[in-house]
Image (spheres, rainbow, N blue to C red):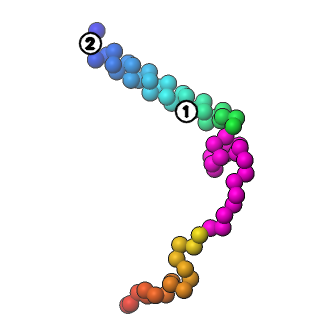
């Protein structure tokens, strides 16, 4: 038996366990939720803020493309 077989078997086992754990968490989310938009239940409703404008409307035509 080669000495490399033990670390490789350990890594494969850990990788398989990680995939199984992530799959389990996908189908069985935590009960308290994270408060995000991942589909889990929120703890408390967050205050909705209006979306911020990235570029004000009056500055949209300041730099027009010249053809």
Say what secondary structure mark 1 lies in.
helix
Q: Nearer the viewer, residue 32 or 22?
A: 32
Residue at image position (39%, 19%) is 10
Q: CA distance from mark 2 to mark 1?
A: 31 Å
* Neighbourhood count class around disc 2 (C-alpha, 10 Å): few under 14, some 14–19, many 20 upward: few
- The residue carrying pointer 1 sits among few (fewer than 14), some (14 to 19) or many (20 or more) residues within 10 Å by Cα, namely few
Assign the magenta stretch its main secondary structure.
Answer: loop
Residue 24 horizontal side relative to residue 11, left or right: right
Q: Residue 53, image x and y in percent?
A: 57, 73
Left or right: 6, with 23 as reference point: left
Say which residue label 2 marks.
Answer: 2
Q: In which image quadrant can residue 30 be found?
A: top right
For residue 56, above or below residue 8? below
Q: Is residue 58 above or below residue 32?
A: below
State yes or no: residue 8 in magenta. Answer: no
Name the residue tied to disc 1.
22
Q: Tell me the element at label 2.
A: loop
The location of residue 35, given as percent across then percent down, is: 65, 46
Quarter containing the C terminus:
bottom left
Q: Residue at x 50, y 24 (%)?
A: 17
Q: Is residue 29 above or below residue 37?
A: above
Q: Of the residues tagged 2 and 1, which is closer to the observer?
A: 1
Q: Residue furthest right?
A: 45
Q: Where does residue 33 sit, x and y in percent of width and height?
A: 67, 40
Instruction: Specify start and end residues of the magenta stretch as a single range.
Output: 33-51
């Amino acid at each position: 038996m080669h000495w490399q077989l033990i670390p490789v078997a350990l890594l494969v086992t850990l990788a398989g366990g990680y995939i199984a754990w992530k799959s389990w968490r996908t189908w069985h989310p935590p009960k308290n939720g994270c408060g995000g938009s991942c589909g889990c239940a929120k703890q408390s409703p967050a205050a909705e803020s209006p979306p911020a404008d990235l570029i004000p409307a009056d500055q949209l035509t300041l730099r027009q493309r010249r053809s």
